[in-house]
Image (cartoon, helix red, strand yellow):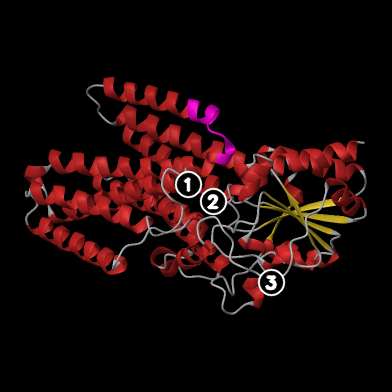
Amino acid sequence: MLTYVSDIIYLVSAVFFIVGIKMLSSPATARRGNYLSALAMVMTVGTTLVVGQIADYTWIIAGVAVGTVVGALAAQWVKMTAMPQLVALFNGLGGAASGLVAVSEYFRRLDTLESYLVIVILLSLTVGAITLSGSLIAYGKLQELIPGRPITYPLQNWGNLLLMLAALGVGIFLVIEPSRIDWFLVLVGISLLIGVLMVLPIGGADMPVVVALLNSFSGIAVAFTGFVLSAKVLIIVGSLVGASGIFLTVAMCVAMNRSVWNVIFGAFGQLDVAAAGPGVAPAAQGAVKAYTIDDALVMLENSDLVIIVPGFGMAAAQAQHAVRELSDKLGERGIEVKFAVHPVAGRMPGHMNVLLAEANVPYDQLYDMDAINDQFKTAGVAMVIGANDVVNPAANEDPSSPIYGMPILRAEEARTVMVLKRSMNPGFAGIDNQLFLRDNTMMLFGDAKSTLSKLVAALKN
């Protein structure tokens, strides 16, 4: 009877996971979806602890206690602007958990290993280790502990291919000779090295894709772990996360008009950054026109529609609350405000949505690229806050540009483009943005949060 009850609970949990992930697709239901998925996880873990015939709960209780404290502190201390780094670490921890289970099961069953079990253990180990080391490198780039630009080396793609073939060869050998612990440890090392060398050549412009891909890897590793442990719920949940991560990765690539292969192996942005020098925009035609707060106020007050385009600069300045306050003040004057969110704005999928939701920006003011692009031509002001590549007209106009063909937000079609930016430094792609030099563009240089606060104060007066 206990087995039947546990199976029913696992089935209900799986349904909750599916529905919860579906609810994450909309800001209006994302929070409830998160709670529902968390409830499913509690049901699953609790049931496993009851029916798992566990001899000693000491280490389990200790692990739960430590994890609870770390999770609670992270939720309180980690700023929303650092959420991409936290997600990268979570991906890595998921890969580490799967890899450790694989190692544990390998040594526990070393004398009775069958081919099927060896294969799933090695798959769980390999994908988990790649996820762990790759996620740590992604974290380092996002946290600026290591350079965010592509870090390349001679014959890097061929080297990565050889490492993958070596991992495959070692895996086949271990299926034939599963008791060779030395070769098992070699596979651990190769897998960790693949993760490092795979992410190092990827630049900051492609971080949303990397985060989505590593999230998918963590799910795939969990699914393989489910086969190792004969745990159906792990197979279901891991497959859900793996599949959704793959779909999200493809969607991110479509939003940049590039293939997953190009993102992983293309070292995008390296040549542009090298040509311009670190932190220096390449030479461009036209003149920069800097304006004052009073100039900007006049433009805003004479607009019927203001479209705000958030970017990573908004996150870096922690300006999301000031943006919402500006939106409220404009609304009080009868000026309609909409937010245009590009799929790859920021450093992780949904980064801008998360920040704006934290600032309590109403969900019905958020528009994706396809829904908002045709409205720019009717806007009095397109306010670009720290965004760069996602509004670069070169994507439509310059066939020689590395981002040519990338779908962008057509901010240049507004009557006035108001750009809040610290300097003329390029974005993640290292490419100069001609939008900043156009006749209808006014530049407001300075910290975005400070600039927005000054605009709000001016509107109040």
Q: Position of residue 11 (x, y in %)?
A: 42, 43
Residue 316, quarter of picture: top right
Q: Main secondary structure of the magenta part?
A: helix
Q: Look at label 1 and name its amino acid.
A: Leu
Task: Using a 10 Å C-alpha cutoff, classify the residue at mark 1 as few (fewer than 14 neighbours), some (14 to 19) or many (20 or more).
Answer: many
Question: In this image, 142 relative to 377: left or right?
Answer: left
Q: Nearer the viewer, residue 336 or 50?
A: 336
Query: Which span is picked out in magenta?
Result: 72-81
Residue type indicated by callout 2 = Arg
Kindly identify which residue carries mark 1.
142
- Count residues near mark 2 (Cα–Cα under 10 Å), then give few for <14, some for 14-19, many for 20+: many
Secondary element at tag 2: loop
The residue nearer to you, when weighing 114 against 450, is 450
Q: Position of residue 141 (x, y in %)?
A: 44, 48
Q: Is residue 76 magenta?
A: yes
Q: Quick one: label 3 or label 2, which is nearer the N terminus?
A: 3
Q: Check whether the beta carbons of the residues at disc 2 and disc 1 lie within 8 A of each other.
A: yes
Instruction: Report the quarter where the C terminus lies.
Output: top right
Q: Is residue 287 visible?
A: yes
Residue that numbered label 2 is attached to? 347
Distance from Cα at disc 2 to Cα at disc 1: 8 Å
Residue receiving disc 3:
285
Q: Is residue 112 left or right of residue 386?
A: left
Q: Dot 1: what SS?
A: helix
